Amino acid sequence: MARFPSSIPRNLRPSRRRHMLLALLLLLFALAYFFHHSSTSSPPTHGFEFTQLQHHMNAPLLPVKAQSQQQQQQKQTKLVSNTSFDWSSHAFGPESPAARKTRESRRETVRQVFLKNWISYRERAWKKDALLPISGGYKDQFSGWAATLVDSLDTLWIMGLREEFDEAVEAVAGIDFGVITTTTKDNGSGGGGGGRVNIFETNIRYLGGLLAAYDLSGREILLAKATELGDLLYAGFNTERRMPVDFIDFERAKTGEGLAVEESVVSASPGTLTLEMTRLSQVTGDMKYYDAASRVMDVFESGQNLTRIPGLWPIYVSMARQDVVSGNQFGVAGGADSLYEYLPKMYALTGGLEARYESMSKAFLEAADKALFFRPMVPGNEDVLMIGTADVTVDGQEDMLLNPESEHLGCFVGGIYGLSGKLFRRLEWVESQGIKITNGCVYAYRAMPTDMMPERYNMVPCQSRDDEGCKWNEELWERERRKRPEWKKHLPKGFTTAKDPRYILRPEAIESVFVMWRITGKREFQEAAWDMFKAVSNGTETEFANAAVLDVTKAEYPLPKEDYMESFWLAETLKYFYLAFSPPDVISLDDFVLNTEAHPFRRPKKPRVDRPLKL
């Protein structure tokens, strides 16, 4: 089992170095930048406040306003707590030798699949964003900053691959965040282009990957690179109302000129900055990152109960107008997912000291259950839940219509109900929603002839969630499937479409299976994880790695594949499979909060002052 460094902040460790770091921290406080907290205030006339961005984007150093040391210390204290959440340790008793042998064998099998992928990436796509798993080429589609490498850092550490980790860290040190090399060619011919940085992807993959790898290893270069990147993302808030842009215009940002916020964006984009920016503030002591992301959540908080489905936000919002209310399409999967995911996780990361994240979490969890979830009618009458979307019509009077179209992306919700049920002491959420949603995703895997779940599909909602209102009715299913032009004869009973039949190596289902295994100790989830792993690893395997499958509804082997492998295959999917067969104290859910890219952030704890600190 890997050993992790102490979670005590480095500036509090008793040594000569501590005094030097304390002095540095005081200097940071004196130089720290701040935003006016009124979201409608005019931007400062002197331009945007840059720090490390001067070096990495060649912009001039501009004058700043400084917060007092007392203000900074008060804010920083707000982000640290002694709170402990007993999420998993109680669920596990002694393990028999036979069970341990089986578990360790399965974990090693997962590790070997990861190694095959990593070796191919190292040999064929080193320092590129993505390996092309069929042709053996590469692609740069996330600014060309080695997305797969950075995204995989913590997986390397967790799997005990120290030599590979060391080599990757050395490569990270050489990444120049001031240069974009995004290409659209798959042949590795290079070339520039784009000129824009996707804030959402950069935040969850790059910044999240660097912070998690730092939290696990303590390597200072990783914190330095995370700070560089944090300053780049901070430039994305240089707008009239301090709302973030969706894409940073790189050349304009270098000049320090204000950026223009896009009129309409998916809600997950601005709503998925809090965990990473807060963790960066926690480890650097610089509150500007937390302040920037917190301002965005002020807007979401103020509008949460004013929407057409109070508690939920529309999928599309306008940060330019600070309008998170007026849309009429609602869902918790694609386009909105991580906005909701981060609400309870922010409560956990700040130790429960940000009370609004509890109320916002509860409001969304209660509203989603009423508006979006349904029990599907299936031949075996299994008691599971699926997640749809909702449209609210606005002609005359408002009517809400459930669309029973489910997405693989929505499978994370089962784990969120499980974690929230433990976190907020609402244990019925674990049983009534967490387990049933997770089992619904497992059902969608097992129902397909390839044992893999499609990206998007439809089923027939039952009249109610009780057994009497949800008996299998083949005549009703046939009537409903005839209404769907996308229906195909080979689809399993219960499914009326597979609108997107691909499996693109997604992690959300195994994510919830892993979480429910950790918080309940129910072995059925560990067995489900193994079944899913066998199907996925075998069905997606290529000569070099693993590839997206084009159609999981037909068991015609070898399955047709796409020459593409997302970095989240190594960062999330294989990591969750590995953790599902690891002891519960490996990335304990009590000690870590995982971001939406499965990067574990260490929950900070206040050091005790009544006894010496131990290194």
Image: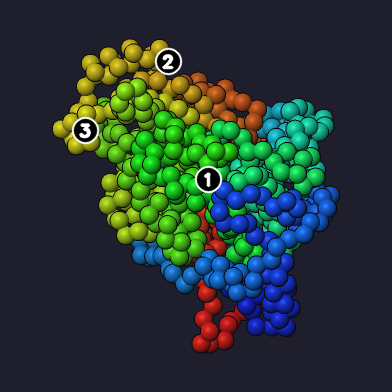
Which quadrant would the C terminus be assigned to in this image? bottom right
- Residue 344 appears in the picture as rendered: yes
User: Residue at 42% of width from left, 35% of height from top?
Assistant: 331
Separation (CA) of disc 3 from disc 1: 33 Å
User: Residue at 61% of width from left, 35% of height from top?
Assistant: 262
Give the amino acid type for the residue marked by disc 1 in the picture: Gly
Secondary structure under tag 2 reads loop
Q: State left or right for residue 570 relative to residue 348.
A: right
Depth check, mark 3 against mark 1: the one in front is 1
Give the amino acid type for the residue marked by disc 3 in the picture: Ser
Which label belongs to residue 486?
2
- Foreground residue, 274 or 473? 274
Q: Is residue 499 above or below residue 573?
A: above
Q: Percent from the top left, x then y, of residue 536?
A: 51, 36
- Residue 138 appears in the picture as rendered: no
Q: Percent from the top left, x then y, of residue 101?
A: 46, 56
Q: State left or right for residue 557 relative to residue 329.
A: right
Q: Which residue is mark 1?
A: 271
Q: Is residue 54 above or below residue 310?
A: below
Give the amino acid type for the residue marked by disc 2 in the picture: Glu
Separation (CA) of disc 2 from disc 1: 33 Å
- For marks 3 and 1 on the same chain, the one whose residue lies earlier in the sequence: 1
For the residue carrying disc 1, how many other residues have a C-alpha within 10 Å: few (<14), some (14-19), or many (20+)?
many
Secondary structure under tag 3 reads loop
For the residue carrying disc 3, how many other residues have a C-alpha within 10 Å: few (<14), some (14-19), or many (20+)?
few
Separation (CA) of disc 3 from disc 2: 26 Å
Q: How many marks?
A: 3
Which quadrant would the N terminus be assigned to in this image? bottom right
Q: State left or right for residue 233 relative to residue 298.
A: right
Q: Which residue is mark 3?
A: 464
User: Residue at 43% of width from left, 68% of height from top?
Assistant: 84
